[in-house]
Each structure stands twice: as structure tokens, then as C-alpha cells.
Amino acid sequence: MPKLLVVVASTRPGRIGPVVADWFLARAKDHAGFDVEVADLAELNLPMMDEPHHPRLKRYEHEHTKNWSAIVESADAFVFVMPEYNYTFTAPLKNAIDYLHGEWAYKPVGFVSYGGLSGGLRAVQSLKGVVTTLNMFPLAASVALPFVPSLITDGALHPNELTEGSAKTMLDELLKVSAALQTLRQ
Ligand SMILES: Cc1cc2nc3c(=O)[nH]c(=O)nc-3n(C[C@H](O)[C@H](O)[C@H](O)COP(=O)(O)O)c2cc1C
């Protein structure tokens, strides 16, 4: 079974990233097409990029990089659970991406974005330029959660049926594209 890595892209105390991620993880487990793993960037706690060599060389000097490299290398597909900060993606997410290079390549990435009015869509659009540089394949199908605090009751996310449907569509697309890209990864 292909492995899906769900990356939680916010790290601040009191963040709602894990609430959104828990909702999506339950959908991913119900979908049953992937082995699902989580990388919470707060727990991973990567320092600001401190490797001396370009990541395409894979000459990593630090244990935290080798560990992160192994996690990303082992994945066949990604979902970034990401808020919008100042109209773009979070600094910890960009930092975590920049640490590596080939580990990301020829793998699809889907987005569960959240925020205020935009539902994080501006952050997703700006991230597409980054991920395509690394030969990741961003999906058009995605999940956007506008006014996300209004969707949380009793510590759990309760989106509407359309959003539930978009999570299923994105997971189906991830599976399809990840299988097709397998050839390029060999
Ligand atoms: C530094 C910062 C900048 C933000 N900028 C935006 C923004 O540009 N657009 C938006 O919709 N929400 C913005 N927000 C609101 C966040 O979307 C909202 O606080 C969300 O809960 C943040 O995700 P987190 O709780 O996982 O950190 C911002 C929040 C923070 C902390």
C-alpha cells in the first residue's frame, strides 16, 4: 500500500493545525487507500535550515536532517495541512521543504488549507511555485476551510458535506497520481 505523509504546517502554541489534521487523518484512514503517517512540524522541531551543502547532494551533516530525509523519502504522497499567514504559507513549512530535495520529487501533494475569508487558498497558490521547483506534483483537487474557527466545536472540526466530499476527491486523486508517478520514481 502507498504511504501518505500528512504534514502539519503550523507550530505555534494554541494552533488549530492538529484539530484540522485529526479531521483529515480520520478521512484518510476511512479512505483506506494509503498507509497514513503524520509529520507534525512542531514535534519535528527542525532548526532554521543549517545544512552547509545543497540538499540535492544529500550530504547531510545533522541527525535531524537525516531523520527528516528518511521520513520524506519513505512517502509516496503528501498532504500539507496548512494555514495562511500574511497571505502565504508558514515559515516552518518552507523551512522543512528547503531541507530536502530529491526526497520530494515525483510525488503528488494535496493541500488542506485553512484561514479566514480565503480558506488559505492564497497560501496554497504561492506554495505551488515552490513544490513544482522540487518536481512535486500539486493536485488541483484540494480542501479549503474558510473561517475555520466557526467549524470547530468541542475541539473537533465539523465541515459541511461539500468539504467532506472534497477530501474524498483529493484522496482519490492522490492515489491515482501517486500510482502513475511510481514509474518516474524508479
Ligand atoms: C501570523 C499570522 C498571520 C495570519 N495571516 C492570515 C492571513 O493572511 N489570512 C488568513 O486568512 N488568516 C490569517 N491568519 C489567521 C490564521 O489563519 C488562523 O489564526 C489560523 O488558526 C492559523 O493556523 P494555526 O492556528 O494552525 O496556527 C494569521 C494568523 C497568524 C498567527
Image (cartoon, helix red, strand yellow):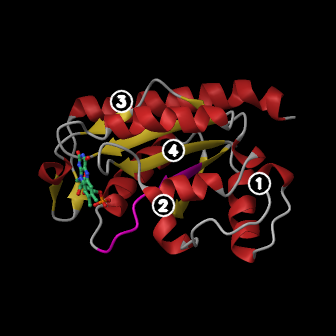
Instruction: Point out the tag, 3 or 4, that comes first from the N-terminus.
Output: 4
> Which amino acid, by three-letter code, is at mark 1?
Pro
Residue type, numbered disc 3: Ser
Label 3 vs label 1, nearer the camera: 1
Q: Residue at x 42, y 49 (%)?
A: 81
Q: Position of residue 97 (x, y in %)?
A: 60, 52
Tag on residue 55? 1
For ligand 1, the image quadrant comes to bottom left
Secondary structure under the numbered disc 2 in the rendered image: helix
| C-alpha span from label 3 to label 1 | 34 Å
Give the CA distance from mark 3 to mark 4: 13 Å
Q: Earlier in the sequence, mark 1 or mark 4?
A: 1
**Position of 38 relative to 138 (above/below):** below
Q: Which mark is residue 92?
A: 2
SS of the residue under disc 1: helix
Report helix, strand or loop for mark 3.
helix
